[in-house]
């Protein structure tokens, strides 16, 4: 299974970066059609960034987040994923929130996390991190995984 970090959802609505917005929209459309799951954590991060950084009205950000909840099935965090995230954070390998997302994704059976914010190509908790943004659209690895090539 392929899942996505909150930054992909943010770029899909961020008009300041039209190239990334187009890639994010394409990626999310494929994930939706393929009925992939996303971390429940994405909902919280998405609305937080939408309000704080994009300065969207709270009600609008909440409606976008609610729409995402309707569109995608989600997976939660667990005690074991929180413990794994704390260990990664303590070892200074990842932020707690990134580690929590990856540990939760692994528990949910995801093998790929699409994210711009983590190290492209790294494999953590058995989850491959793939940056979907390439120099000219969708990155080659993401296109291969999403069967866009």
Image (cartoon, rainbow, N blue to C red):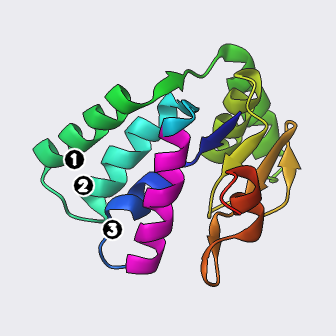
Furthest-bottom residue in this view: 135
Mark 3 Cα within 10 Å, few/some/many (few <14, many 20+)?
some
Disc 2 versus disc 3: nearer the observer? 3
Q: Which label's residue is closer to the chain start, 2 or 3?
A: 3
Q: Name the residue at 73% across, 32% down.
A: 110
Mark 2 Cα within 10 Å, few/some/many (few <14, many 20+)?
some
Q: Is residue 138 above or below residue 136?
A: above
Callout 2–callout 3 Cβ contact below 8 Å: no
Mark 1 Cα within 10 Å, few/some/many (few <14, many 20+)?
some
Q: Which mark is residue 14?
A: 3
Residue in the foreground of this view, choosing between 128 and 50: 128
In the rendered image, residue 59 lying in the magenta stretch gets the answer: no
The CA span between labels 2 and 3 is: 12 Å
Q: Residue 61: x percent and y percent?
A: 22, 47
Q: Which residues are magenta?
A: 18-32
Q: Residue 7: x percent and y percent?
A: 50, 57
The CA span between labels 2 and 1 is: 6 Å
Q: Name the residue at 71% across, 63% down.
A: 149
The residue that disc 1 covers is 61
Q: Which label's residue is closer to the chain start, 1 or 3?
A: 3
Left of 36 or right of it: where is 83?
right
| SS for dot 1 | helix
The residue that disc 2 covers is 51
Q: Residue 55: x percent and y percent?
A: 20, 63
Left of 118 or right of it: where is 72?
left
* Residue 29 visible from this viewpoint: yes
Q: Which label's residue is closer to the chain start, 2 or 1?
A: 2
Q: Name the residue at 53% across, 55% down.
A: 27
Is the magenta region chiefly helix, strand or loop?
A: helix
| SS for dot 2 | helix
| SS for dot 3 | loop
Callout 2–callout 1 Cβ contact below 8 Å: yes
């Amino acid at each position: 299974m392929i899942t996505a970090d909150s930054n992909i959802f943010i770029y899909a609505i961020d008009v300041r970066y039209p190239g990334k917005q187009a890639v994010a929209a394409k990626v999310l459309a494929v994930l939706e059609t393929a009925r992939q799951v996303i971390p429940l954590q994405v909902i919280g991060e998405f609305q937080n960034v939408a309000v704080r950084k994009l300065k969207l009205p709270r009600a609008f950000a909440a409606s976008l987040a609610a729409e995402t909840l309707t569109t995608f099935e989600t997976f939660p965090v667990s005690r074991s994923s929180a413990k794994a995230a704390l260990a990664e954070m303590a070892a200074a390998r990842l932020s707690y929130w990134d580690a929590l997302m990856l540990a939760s994704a692994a528990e949910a059976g995801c093998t790929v996390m699409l994210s711009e914010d983590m190290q492209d190509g790294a494999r953590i908790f058995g989850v491959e991190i793939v940056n979907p943004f390439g120099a000219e659209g969708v990155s080659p690895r993401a296109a291969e995984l999403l069967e866009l090539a």
